[in-house]
């Protein structure tokens, strides 16, 4: 595939520069918890200051830092664009990796390390794009804002949530570009660059049930909370949650290069699952990603009960990773749980929110979407974007709630096995190719230069 990476054609030395920025960022351990993003923010402050940027660091807690800078545009009336990324990463289990996850090693044109894909690669690409624009002495049409935040991998309380709640006037933007999309699906008819326009809402919940303690030798004299909870978990696991077709899902299907009849089947709640099951025989990975886009998920992930081997436990607690489609509310989840468990068992449950955020969605009928499509067509002559919903969640939601149009997009091509690549973020041996790092940088550079 021929890519037009003009920025790197004109400045051969830029490749090494952006690679070394990513390596430096990987080597700053920002595993969350605890985060320690301030160190990375200070690194970026130094880097940007050297290029003549004025930066501000917003500390949300001890060692938790968010860094902001901007480039004033020619026309201050044009809607502002914000480049947004996060500095924290999920922890890495060193033993499982082939290299030290914080080494940032460059091996065969791949940069290895925790955060290479999620999302220090994008941090490096975005920050280098603004640097390159400054060096080229180009004043963008609209004001460009840049923000790196802490704490995305937890709930954003020290990052995006903190910034949108406390410093909105400073960072506010009509358009936001962050993570959660950009991967070009290497499957015929689906081979477009996914642009994240919607995401499901995490409704992480703790559930508790009560029993009655008794001696383990006479179990009938008590009520076993552990076995009650295991029934609840089994019922949830066995239940087939009904399909719901949402607007962002329809938008996605409408933009695929498939015929009208196939689109109809994919958007019909009775036919979509049989179709997905059939396609999955050829492309198993599609089911993994598409099924969650037409269903709410309720997934038990943790459970604890009991204090001693000979005591009938009087309490059991489990945690559920529930994910709601955009447009669904807490009531939809409660009704679904009631339906799965039945009135009686449901009434015995105590449900405690850990993090309850609704899903979010942006339309695509705006010049931001058009510009992104146009630039992708320039860089990759067969390239098109596909408005996409993701089953996970990103900081985009905080900006959508504030009224911004927030898309997740760092264009990337599959330059290794697709299935393996899809497991790298949050998995072992996370790495990004130099080519995808350059592709992202080129894209952000053109976006801030031409939009
Ligand atoms: Zn991320």
Image (cartoon, rainbow, N blue to C red):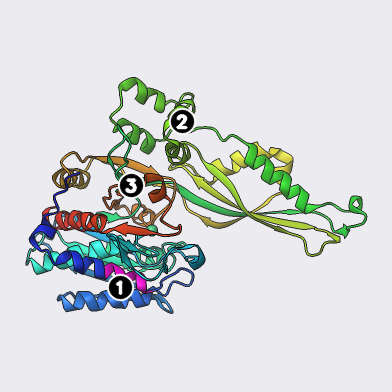
Task: Answer with mark 1 or mark 2, whichever residue precedes in sequence.
Answer: 1
Q: Position of residue 63 (x, y in %)?
A: 41, 78
Q: Residues within 10 Å of mark 1 (few under 14, many from 20)?
A: some
Residue at mark 1 to residue at mark 3: CA–CA distance: 28 Å
Numbered circle sitting on residue 281 = 2
x then y, percent, for residue 410: 28, 53
Quadrant in the rendering for residue 387 = top left
Extreme residue toward the front, this view: 108
| Label 1 CB less than 8 angstroms from ligand 1 | no
Q: Answer left or right for 182 relative to 165.
A: left
**Label 3 belongs to which residue?**
196
Residue at point 62%, 36% (across, down): 239
Q: Is residue 242 left or right of residue 251?
A: right
**Eye-nearest disc, 3 or 2:** 2
Any part of residue 338 in sight: no
Magenta residues?
21-28
Counting from the top left corner in percent of width and height, residue 411 is at 26, 50
Q: Residues at badges 1 and 2 in contact (C-beta under 8 Å)?
A: no
Viewer-proximal residue, 240 or 439?
439
Lower position in the chain sequence, tag 1 or tag 3: 1
Q: Quadrant of ligand 1?
A: bottom left
Q: Which mark is residue 213?
A: none
Above-or-below relation of 163 to 190? below
Which type of secondary structure does the marked residue at label 1 adopt? helix
Residue 86 magenta-highlighted: no
The label on residue 24 is 1
Residue 101 visible in image? yes
Residue 411 drawn above or below residue 271: below
Residues at marks 1 and 3 touching, judged by CB atoms closer than 8 Å: no
Please give the name of the residue rendered at 60% of the width and 39% of the height, measured from the top-left corner. Answer: 335
* Classed neighbour count for the residue bearing mark 2: other residues with Cα under 10 Å, few (<14), some (14–19), many (≥20): few
| Residue 352 location (% of width, % of height) | 62, 56
């Amino acid at each position: 595939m021929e890519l037009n990476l003009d920025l790197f054609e004109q400045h051969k030395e830029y490749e090494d520069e952006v690679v070394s920025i990513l390596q430096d960022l990987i080597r700053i351990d920002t595993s969350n918890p605890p985060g320690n993003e301030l160190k990375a923010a200070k690194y970026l402050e130094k880097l940007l200051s050297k290029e003549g940027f004025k930066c501000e660091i917003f500390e949300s807690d001890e060692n938790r830092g968010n860094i902001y800078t901007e480039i004033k545009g020619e026309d201050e009336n044009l809607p502002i664009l914000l480049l947004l990324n996060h500095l924290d990463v999920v922890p890495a289990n060193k033993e499982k990796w082939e290299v030290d996850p914080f080494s940032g090693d460059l091996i065969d044109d791949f940069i290895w390390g925790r955060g290479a894909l999620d999302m220090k690669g994008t941090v490096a690409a975005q920050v280098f794009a603004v640097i390159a624009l400054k060096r080229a002495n180009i004043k963008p049409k609209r004001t460009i804002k840049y923000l790196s935040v802490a704490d995305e991998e937890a709930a954003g309380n020290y990052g995006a949530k903190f910034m949108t709640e406390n410093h909105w006037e400073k960072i506010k933007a009509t358009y936001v570009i962050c993570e959660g999309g950009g991967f070009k699906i290497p499957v015929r008819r689906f081979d477009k660059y996914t642009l994240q326009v919607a995401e499901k809402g995490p409704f992480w919940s703790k559930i508790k049930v009560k029993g009655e303690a008794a001696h383990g030798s006479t179990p009938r004299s008590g009520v076993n909370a552990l076995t009650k909870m295991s029934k609840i978990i089994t019922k949830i696991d066995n239940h087939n949650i009904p399909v719901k077709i949402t607007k962002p899902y329809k938008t996605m299907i409408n933009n695929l290069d498939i015929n009208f009849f196939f689109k109809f089947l994919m958007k019909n709640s009775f036919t979509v699952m049989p179709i997905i099951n059939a396609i999955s025989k050829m492309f198993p990975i599609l089911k993994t990603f598409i099924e969650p886009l037409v269903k709410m998920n309720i997934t038990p992930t943790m459970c604890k009960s009991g204090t001693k081997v000979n005591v009938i436990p009087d309490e059991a607690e489990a945690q559920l990773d529930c994910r709601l489609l955009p447009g669904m509310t807490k009531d939809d989840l409660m009704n679904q749980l009631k339906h799965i468990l039945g009135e009686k068992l449901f009434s015995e449950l105590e449900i405690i929110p850990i993090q309850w955020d609704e899903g979010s969605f942006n339309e695509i009928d705006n010049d931001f979407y058009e510009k992104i499509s146009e630039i992708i067509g320039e860089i990759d002559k067969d390239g098109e974007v596909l408005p996409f919903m993701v089953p996970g969640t990103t900081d985009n939601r905080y900006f959508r709630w504030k009224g911004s149009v927030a898309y997740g997009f760092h264009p990337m091509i599959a330059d290794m096995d697709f299935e393996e690549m899809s497991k790298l973020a949050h998995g072992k041996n996370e790495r990004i190719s130099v080519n995808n790092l350059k592709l992202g940088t080129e894209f952000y550079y053109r976006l801030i230069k031409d939009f």
